[in-house]
């Protein structure tokens, strides 16, 4: 990867990233740690080159295989919520996708485990993230609803695709005081939701309406 491609020019330049961060602040993102990481992360590397000029718009973009890279506001909002009470040490991401959410998280927490059901997407993201220099992200090809039980318990589980209801297998992988955050509900009626583990209970908190691709089962080549 060339230095020009990595750092960006024109519509992928640092100035363009700075404008995007300004928009995120206007939308209510307050955590300066999150804003700094969003500012530093070259989102244009996580989309196809033909869409690079749109990488810093606050919109979701297609990444192939019927999947999208989430809009920057949603990535920032979910990351802000991950850090809301303390700095988690052990985070599971369900749905690697483009790798952008994992890249943001990996700059803020020590260990990120990410699972993806589409092998071609997983390999593309793995190569990119390793090339950019992330050594604290661990990858696995897996049905997202299975999570990664061998690495559990997790302080936080982040969903980047929406189940109609949260799989019990994922809730079982939360640490005793951990929480899951992600979109929940059918298409057209999804809510960004936090599910906290409190001893033997799970407490649900709805944050705001969202629109994500559905969480699908099974593996794809």
Image: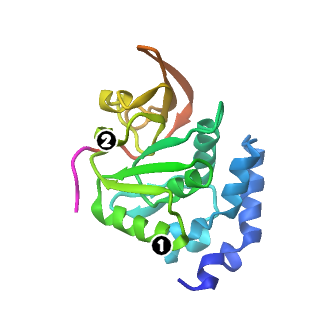
Residues rendered magenta in the picture:
217-221
Q: Main secondary structure of the magenta part?
A: loop
The x, y position of residue 198, in whole percent, is 49, 16
Q: Nearer the viewer, mark 1 or mark 2?
A: 2
Q: Is residue 155 above or below residue 79?
A: above
Above or below: residue 194 compared with residue 219: above
Identify the secondary structure beneath mark 2. Answer: helix
* Residue 176 falls within the magenta-colored stretch: no
Give the number of the disc on residue 119.
none
Residue 48 is tagged as 1
Residue nearer the viewer, 15 or 114: 114
Residue 150 bears which disc, if any?
2
Residue 50 in the image: x percent, y percent?
50, 77
Residue 89 in the image: state x and y as whole percent: 55, 41
Q: Earlier in the sequence, mark 1 or mark 2?
A: 1
Residue 114, horizontal then vertical, whole percent: 41, 51
Say above or below: 149 vs 198: below
């Amino acid at each position: 990867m060339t230095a020009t491609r990595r750092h960006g020019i024109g519509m992928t330049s640092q100035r363009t990233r700075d404008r995007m961060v300004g928009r995120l602040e206007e939308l209510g993102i307050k955590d300066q740690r999150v804003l700094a990481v969003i500012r530093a992360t070259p989102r244009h590397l996580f989309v196809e080159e033909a869409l690079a000029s749109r990488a810093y718009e606050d919109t979701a973009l297609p990444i192939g295989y019927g999947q999208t890279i989430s809009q920057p506001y949603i990535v920032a909002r979910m990351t802000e919520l991950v850090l809301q009470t303390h700095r988690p040490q052990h985070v599971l991401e369900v749905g690697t996708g483009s790798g952008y959410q994992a890249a943001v998280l990996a700059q803020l927490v020590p260990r990120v485990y990410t699972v993806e059901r589409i092998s071609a997407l997983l390999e593309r993201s793995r190569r990119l993230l390793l090339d950019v220099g992330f050594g604290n992200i661990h990858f696995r090809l897996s049905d997202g609803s299975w999570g990664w039980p061998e690495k559990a318990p997790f302080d936080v589980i982040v969903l980047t695709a929406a189940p109609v209801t949260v799989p019990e297998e994922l809730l079982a992988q939360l640490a005793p005081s951990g929480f899951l955050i992600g979109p929940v509900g059918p298409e057209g009626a999804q809510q960004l939701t936090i599910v906290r583990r409190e001893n033997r209970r799970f407490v649900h908190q709805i944050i705001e309406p969202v629109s994500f691709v559905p969480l699908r089962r099974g593996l794809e080549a």
